[in-house]
Amino acid sequence: QCRSKECKMSGTGNDYIGTLNTTISNRTCQHWTANEPHSVPQTLLSKELFPELSLDNVNNFCRNPSHDIFGPWCYTNDPNVETDLCNVLDCDVPDACTVIVTGTNSARQYIYILPLWKSIGLEFKVKNWDPKWMEGV
């Protein structure tokens, strides 16, 4: 539920899972797994690069698998314009959801904590560990 269908919670919009499929210049997005009119590099077709962790449902929706600083984008169906940005708005309250990520690649696990679930807050403790000092281990 924390991944937004209406807006982007992170600045780069890597979390956006909406169905917007039109760019800021009003071009229709090409399906991510199609190779016409533009060839999508295999390096961008890794399921780990999409918030759904799958290519099955990304269709031709705006996404940001390259983690572009300008936000979600897509390959266009216009043969003269390869890629274009999408106008995915920022969420009003980006800190309304806390996302904790553990693991790497396909072993990634996400824990979403919504404010409604929190009764007394969330506490984190961080320890700066120096292997030369074994005290406290």
Image (spheres, grey):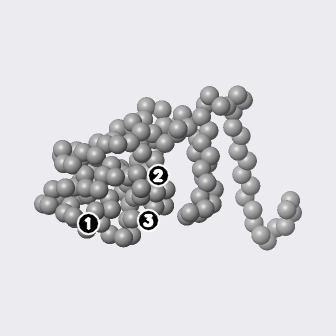
Front residue of this view, candidates 58 and 104: 58
- Amino acid type indicated by mark 1: Asn
Q: Is residue 7 above or below residue 61?
A: above
**Residue 115 falls in which quadrant of the image?**
top right
Mark 1: few/some/many CA within 10 Å (<14, 14-19, 20+): few
Q: Which mark is residue 35?
A: 1
Determine the CA span between mark 1 and mark 2.
21 Å
Left or right: 84 in relation to 13:
left
Residue 64, horizontal then vertical, whole percent: 38, 54
Q: Residue at x 79, y 71 (%)?
A: 132
Q: Residue at x 35, y 38 (%)?
A: 89
Q: Residue at x 54, y 34 (%)?
A: 96
The residue that mark 2 highlights is: 51
Front residue of this view, candidates 71 and 110: 110
Residue 90 makes an appearance in the image: no
Residue 136, horizontal then vertical, whole percent: 86, 59
Mark 3 secondary-structure assignment: loop
Q: Is residue 41 above or below residue 14?
A: below
Of the two numbered discs 1 and 2 on the same chain, state the one appearing first in sequence. Answer: 1
Mark 1 secondary-structure assignment: loop
Residue lying at the far front in this picture: please name it. Answer: 56
- Amino acid type indicated by mark 2: Pro
Of the two numbered discs 1 and 3 on the same chain, state the one appearing first in sequence. Answer: 1
Determine the CA span between mark 3 and mark 2.
11 Å
Mark 3: few/some/many CA within 10 Å (<14, 14-19, 20+): some
The residue that mark 3 highlights is: 46
Left or right: 45 in relation to 31:
right
**Residue 5 falls in which quadrant of the image?**
top left
Mark 2 secondary-structure assignment: loop
- Amino acid type indicated by mark 3: Ser
